[in-house]
Amino acid sequence: MLSTLSSNAILSKARAMYGRCLTKENFKDLLACQSVGEVAAYLKSHTAYNKTLAGINENDIHRGQLESKLKQKLFEDYASLCRYEISVGEHFSQYLIMRSEIEQILHSILLLEAGKPEEYIFAMPMYLNRHTHINLSALSQIKSYSDLLDALSHTPYYKLLEKFKPVTGVPINYTGIENALYTYLFKNVFDVIDKYTRGETAKQLREIFNSYVDLVNYVRIIRLKDSYQASPDFIRSSLLPFGNISKRLLTEMIEADNEAKVTAAMNKTLIGKRSLKIDHTYIDEFPNIVKYMTSRHDIHFSTHPSVVMFSYTFIMQVELTDIITIVEGIRYKMSPDEIAKLLIIFNFGERSD
């Protein structure tokens, strides 16, 4: 168990780091940028990303390279917190590594499907090389699904992806692959919680992840019904097998005729009653909005170091997502007002909670 001194050090360090997160004014300034280079220059000169971005040429940076650099800061921040909590921190650091590996695999599959696998080289996260078992160089050179399997042959992901090897002429089952990879991720997270934490800490961590899974599954059900008219069996196979929603209510949501009935069933759950009143413009952003609000509360009020560490990590992940959204908005020549509607942190103070 952690000493009181170590616990206090983690709480203080994480909250100090949170105090250096981007403000609403920072986001206003970023929304005024007109290129990836301007975003990089602003982050380098005016924010806590200055050390991570030191030495880059902001006039010649690809959006993928910028994204990789920003994710590097999250890794470095988490590593600095782990120094205070070696016993649990090093096990939870595997969550961050595994999540990053899964993001890389899914990104390479999307590029493969789009016929642009060579673009992976621009987003290849060099910082991850020190931590991952994936051969990122091999991943950057794939030209087919077989190449992808070869690149992952010495990792746990090989067996997960092998069964999704597509037949010639049939598209890659991206939804199935994504679900298999994130099921593997969350299973590992819950295993770590059960093995290395106890009491109230374990209870809070399980609640954090189960609530997030419930929201992700809720959004998936709506998306699969509305956009793909998917059958109940396909929807059931596409959900993460965790969460607090009862089997009966989950079946009610899966078999509902429309979004209103799915939401009505969700409203019967504890997480639904707490979260569905929160304003959101787009359904896809909903789990991250709730995760951000919960994490802001926990980083201020939780007395459990592991909970505070995860809260900081979640907040930073949302911040990164918002920055990347701005970069993508600039790339597609969206107006600042259009981009602003897609942001979570920028709109936080205007949401009902």
Image (cartoon, rainbow, N blue to C red):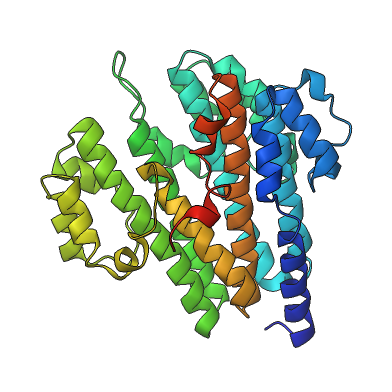
Identify the residue at image location x=36%, y=68%.
274
Horizontal side of residue 143 vs 120, given as left or right: left
Could you tell me residue 341's position as x and y percent?
49, 38
Foreground residue, 296 or 175? 296
Foreground residue, 221 or 136? 221
| Position of 129 relative to 5 (above/below) | above
Could you tell me residue 131's position as x and y percent?
70, 46
Looking at the image, can residue 212 be seen? yes
| Position of 175 relative to 73 (above/below) | above
Foreground residue, 315 or 249? 315
Identify the residue at image location x=74%, y=61%.
19
Work out which quarter of the rendered image holds the N terminus and state it: bottom right
Image quarter of residue 270 = bottom left
Identify the residue at image location x=75%, y=43%.
130
Horizontal side of residue 83 vs 95, given as left or right: right
Horizontal side of residue 92 vs 16, given as left or right: left
Q: How many numbered callouts?
A: 0
| Position of 225 relative to 97 (above/below) | above
Horizontal side of residue 162 vs 54, given as left or right: left
Image quarter of residue 177 = top left
Furthest toward the right, the residue is: 55
